[in-house]
Image: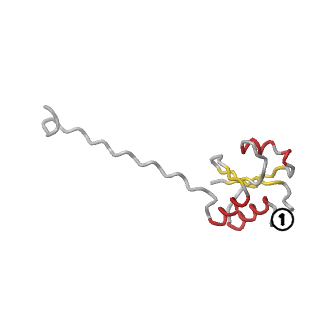
């Protein structure tokens, strides 16, 4: 599954407390392949992020192939470290039982 990490463009900010760096570092340490999508370091210059999230302009965000997103650097980092970043595909619905063929003429349960 393709994963995109949306983060601010301050890639030089490699401080432990910087949320974008914390999320990116956790993905790197977990060996997760991702596409890096950089956005402005200034929130008011992130209308595309607000459109993606439905309102908030906060980063980082992980965007999954199906369009779903995961926000909050601590959540992203925890799930990456635990190997649960990419959600499992939903289980296929069980197939309904096959209908039994109607009884042949003259068999019990069939009028005739």
**Relative to 13, residue 70 above or below:** above
Q: Residue at x 23, y 38 (%)?
A: 102
The quarter in which the C terminus is drawn is top left
Q: Residue at x 87, y 62 (%)?
A: 12
Task: Name the image colouring.
Answer: secondary structure
Query: Residue 48 location, x and y as percent?
Result: 78, 43
In the image, taking residue 57 as reference, residue 66 lies left or right, namely left
Q: Nearer the viewer, residue 104 or 57?
A: 57
Query: Residue 52 location, x and y as percent?
Result: 73, 44
Neighbourhood count class around disc 1 (C-alpha, 10 Å): few under 14, some 14–19, many 20 upward: some
Q: Nearer the viewer, residue 32 or 72?
A: 72
Query: Residue 26 location, x and y as percent?
Result: 72, 65
Q: Nearer the viewer, residue 29 or 20?
A: 20
Q: Nearer the viewer, residue 78 or 97?
A: 78
**Relative to 8, residue 112 above or below:** above
In the image, taking residue 89 as reference, residue 58 lies left or right, namely right
The quarter in which the N terminus is drawn is bottom right
**Relative to 32, residue 70 above or below:** above
Residue 78: name its quadrant.
bottom right
Instruction: Provide the residue designation for mark 1.
Output: 14
Residue 30: name its quadrant.
bottom right
Query: Residue 91 location, x and y as percent?
Result: 49, 52
Q: What SS does tag 1 mark?
A: loop
Task: Tell which residue pokes out farthest to the top in this image.
Answer: 112
In the image, taking residue 104 as reference, residue 57 lies left or right, namely right
Q: Residue at x 59, y 56 (%)?
A: 87
Disc tally is: 1
């Amino acid at each position: 599954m393709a994963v995109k990490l949306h983060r601010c463009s301050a890639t030089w900010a490699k401080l432990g407390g910087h949320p974008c760096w914390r999320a990116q570092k956790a993905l790197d340490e977990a060996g997760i392949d991702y596409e890096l999508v950089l956005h402005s370091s200034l929130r008011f210059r992130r209308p595309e992020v607000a459109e993606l999230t439905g309102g908030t302009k906060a980063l980082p965000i992980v965007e999954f192939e199906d369009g779903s997103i995961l926000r909050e650097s601590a959540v992203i980092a925890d799930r990456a470290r635990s190997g649960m970043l990419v959600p499992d595909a939903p289980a296929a619905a069980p197939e309904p039982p096959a209908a039994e063929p109607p009884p042949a003429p003259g068999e019990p349960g069939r009028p005739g």
